Amino acid sequence: MYSEKVMDHFQNPRNMGEIEDASGVGTVGNAKCGDIMRIFLDIDEDGIIREARFKTFGCGAAVATSSMATELVKGRTVQEALQVTNKAVMEALDGLPPVKVHCSLLAEEAIHAALWDYAQKQGVVIQGLEKPKADIHDGDSE
Ligand code: FES
């Protein structure tokens, strides 16, 4: 049911933990399954993501997508990080079962929320980044 990559990132998650004094922090959740994901970004003065970490209280797919999403945004500019969509994360994981697609959506939303937090703190605009909706969504927007 799960790809080897999903199992690997679930069993050996990369970048788990927090970043103290992070440049941006985003927390999102899904009200239906109750899972919560928080992503921390450390961004340098050139707008490059130096470090990304996550804390996820959720299912295995949520852990695997957080792990992969943090890997994918590291070393990218804040603008490039917008391209790390849930589809990009799923592709990098060799797919997810349909019922688990919403888990990867959490990763995209958590990155966007962290980027938004950074932009607010720095007073900068990230082209194409929309204000995160509510912190917790109902999971119908797959
Ligand atoms: Fe909800 Fe995975 S079951 S995030």
Image: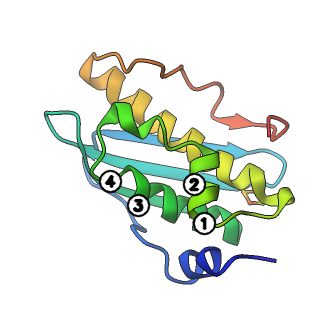
Q: Are circles 4 and 3 on residues that touch, CB within 8 Å? A: yes
Say left or right for 36 vs 20: right
Residue that badge 3 annotates: 71
Q: Residues within 10 Å of mark 2 (few under 14, many from 20)?
A: many
Calculate the distance from the C-alpha at mark 2 to the C-alpha at mark 3.
Answer: 10 Å
Q: Find numbered disc 1 in the image and state the secondary structure of the residue it sits on.
A: loop
* Mark number, residue 89: 2
Q: Residues within 10 Å of mark 3 (few under 14, many from 20)?
A: some
Q: Is mark 3 within 8 Å of ligand 1?
A: no
Q: Residues within 10 Å of mark 1 (few under 14, many from 20)?
A: many
Residue 136 found in image quarter: top right
Q: Are circles 2 and 3 on residues that touch, CB within 8 Å? A: no
- Please tell me which of labels 1 and 4 falls first in the chain: 4
Q: Give amino acid for label 1.
A: Leu
* Mark number, residue 74: 4
In percent of width and height, residue 21 lies at: 25, 46
- Residue drawn where x is 64% and y is 53% of the image: 36
Q: Give amino acid for label 3.
A: Glu
Residue that badge 1 annotates: 93
Q: Give amino acid for label 4.
A: Lys
Q: Quadrant of the N terminus?
A: bottom right
Q: Residues within 10 Å of mark 4 (few under 14, many from 20)?
A: some
